[in-house]
Image: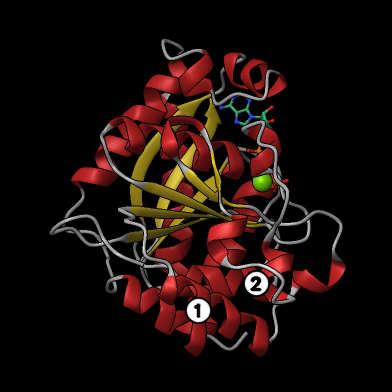
Amino acid sequence: MNTAEGRTVRTIAVASGKGGVGKTNITANLAIAFSKMNKKVMILDADLGLSNIDVVLNLATKYNIKHLFTGEKKLKDIIVEGPMGIKILPASSGIQELTALDEFQRLRLIEEFESYDEEVDYLLIDTSSGISPNVAFFCMAAQEILIITSPEPTAMTDAYALIKVLFTKYQEKNFKVLVNSVKDSAEATDVYKRLSTAAEQFLSISLDYIGFIPRDDFLPKAVRQQKAVLEAYPESKAAKSLTDIAEKISNDNNSSVKGTLQFFLGGLLKTKC
Ligand SMILES: Nc1ncnc2c1ncn2[C@@H]1O[C@H](COP(=O)(O)OP(=O)(O)OP(=O)(O)O)[C@@H](O)[C@H]1O
Ligand SMILES: [Mg+2]
């Protein structure tokens, strides 16, 4: 995979532990926000057994990652183009065996990415809920991990559990926290503080606060229209926050970047889950 002139690919895994806290919508909208900044964006739907990004963005997908593993198709045959030229590598739905990739499937993925010659600035990885081997695998392969939580105690507990597993099992120390579905900024910082206090106290790691997205009825409204809120309701509060967050990520040059796309490929190989 090539990088756009003079730039390196940033690979960002979006993860949460708990399901339904907004990973897929955040991934889709950040992709649109980055595209609006003239960046070339690819989304990897890593919710391999229960894909969603195609539904959220109303994409017609003929093939998916399963066809890559069976050897029937190449990456370029599977990738579909979404809004604003975003490239999407769709997952499959209802395929149990993809919930934990084996060594062969990982190698296949790496092989395909290596020979993919389109330019990419951002590779966003929409992971599944839970702390499955695949979630750990994609989080560890990516350069940056964006942890999504909502103010619900179960979402916070699960976000902490995911951080704890990635730290204790893989020594990962860098996490960006995004608080979704909050009333206001004060509620978001309170959630962040509680999570980061626990991480500091029990794991001795500090978490980065990246921002918040308010609870906004325009978001589910856009979901029902199978559009990203940034496209359907660009003036909504949620869309504005998502744009701010994308800008913050893009300006975050001093982030916890572990390497370039080569690292991603290497990481895919190295990570034993
Ligand atoms: N900021 C928000 N305001 C209002 N509703 C929201 C917000 N964020 C998410 N939602 C609601 O939560 C639903 C679930 O979001 P999404 O599918 O993105 O979560 P997810 O974490 O990807 O779920 P899964 O773990 O099942 O993949 C959305 O369809 C939307 O209705
Ligand atoms: Mg999802």
153 shown above or below 196: above
Residue neighbourhood size for the residue with mark 2, other residues' Cα within 10 Å, grouped as few (<14), some (14–19), many (≥20): many
Image location (x, y in percent) of residue 42: 45, 51
Identify the element where label 1 is drawn: helix
Residue 77 pos. (x, y %): 59, 58
User: Viewed as shown, does residue 179 lie left or right of 10?
Assistant: right
- Which residue shows up at 41% across the image and 30% down it? 242
Mark 1 belongs to which amino acid?
Ile
Amino acid type at mark 2: Asn
* Nearest to the observer: residue 173 or residue 231: 231
Frontmost residue, 251 versus 117: 117
Q: Which residue is mark 1?
A: 110
Secondary structure of the residue carrying numbered label 2:
helix
Is 237 left or right of 50, judged from the image as shown? Answer: left
Rendered residue at 74%/66% (across/down)? 66
Residue 183 appears in view: no
Colour theme: secondary structure
Dividing the image into 4 quarters, which one contains the C terminus? Answer: bottom right
| Closer to us: 3 or 227 | 3
Q: Which residue is mark 2?
A: 134
